[in-house]
Amino acid sequence: MQHLSDRINNLPISATLAMAAKARELKAEGKDIISLSLGEPDFNTPEFIKEAAKQAIDENYNSYSPVDGYLDLREAICRKFKRDNNLIYSPNQIVVSTGAKQSIANVAMVLLNPGDEVLLPAPYWVSYSAIATLAEANYIEIPSTIETDFKITPEQLEAAITPKTKLIFFNSPNNPSGTVYTESEYRALGKVLEKHPNIYIISDEIYEHINYGEANFSFASIESLYDRTITINGVAKAFAMTGWRIGYIGAPNWIAKACTKMQGQITSGANCIAQRATITALDAPVSKIQFMVDEFHKRRDLVLNLVKDINGLKANVPKGAFYVFPDVSYYFGETIGGIDINNASDFSMLLLEKANVATVTGEAFGAPDCIRISYAASTENLKEAFKRIKEVLS
């Protein structure tokens, strides 16, 4: 007899990780699967960062690290925020965690009470809703469509706010859509939030450096909302360091303190070697990782052309991150290869089973008409994947 908690029973499995596991399973069975499901750069961590990690090992960094991160790393994060985002934080406002996902979970756990409401402009990263559920809050989706470039309006935001609203998530460049909010769009949304002093803002900027011409604007640089904004970032995406597991926040001191307390009872400090390497990564000029961004830009243009070439797929032009998020609703109601397509999940399974291409259903991101395709893959794999998709759909 199983006696699992309601907490775990009510928690959904991460759709991106589930699809990646399914793809690995099929690969192990000998199927030639092209995985376009994971949000993970296909580059190796740059050499200068690996050298810093080796040096840290030789310098015998092997003891528990401070719960909120080494002081010199938190100072490096402050320099990074000043240089890249024009944000002034002091080291006591920074908490380093085991990945940005833990950073977000910490903030949700220290701010949310059962029954509080969390606003999620959709599409949103799959774990936002799960983390809100874990904190016993209710999440409210604010929908958007491909026609609005997957952006919400100030009017929509105002209409979604209730006396129970405690937290809103913003994520730009956005996962899954690649959408980038401009400064004026964020300021217009900020005007609405200024009227509601009890609402806090999580600004997830993990993809900030992966953008194609639209400058990244940090929500916390809206002066009136600085004291209510928690800026989330990390080294996974821009530095190809997903497995190193380093994320961090810049936040009001009282929130940072609470997150340190929370983390002290769950994981304590993040990996000591990864922290030392992160100091080197963040102090380096951003130009050192530009080669990856340039390659993603080329692939984005390639993928948009490949999407255009397939009847019934509609995509916006992503200004950042490394995803396209096509609307596939044209195929709903069809039967293809013996599979009934009633929604994006069916469509995603069709591509996996008949084209051997792994993608992720948009339902997991609060956008049931779309699928997410990651172009963090080689040009050859992208061309081959779309060739297979086209064959199955035609």
Image (tube, helix red, strand yellow):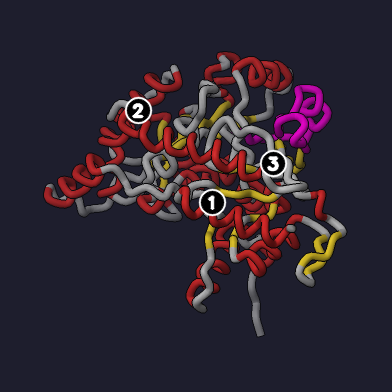
The residue that disc 2 covers is 286
Q: Tell which circle, 1 or 2, labels the residue nearer the N-terminal end.
A: 2
Q: Nearer the viewer, residue 96 or 287?
A: 287
What's the residue type where badge 2 is placed? Val
The residue that disc 1 covers is 383
Residue at left 39%, top 40%?
A: 235
Q: Nearer the viewer, residue 131 or 316?
A: 316
What's the residue type where badge 3 is placed? Pro
**Residue 374, image x, y percentages:** 55, 48
**Residue 219, image x, y percentages:** 57, 23
What's the residue type where badge 1 is placed? Lys
**Residue 116, image x, y percentages:** 72, 42
- Distance Cα–Cα, label 1 vs label 3: 26 Å
- SS at badge 3: loop
Magenta stretch in the rendered image = 143-171
The residue that disc 3 covers is 123
Q: Nearer the viewer, residue 204 or 107?
A: 204
**Can you say which quadrant of the picture contains the C terminus?**
bottom right
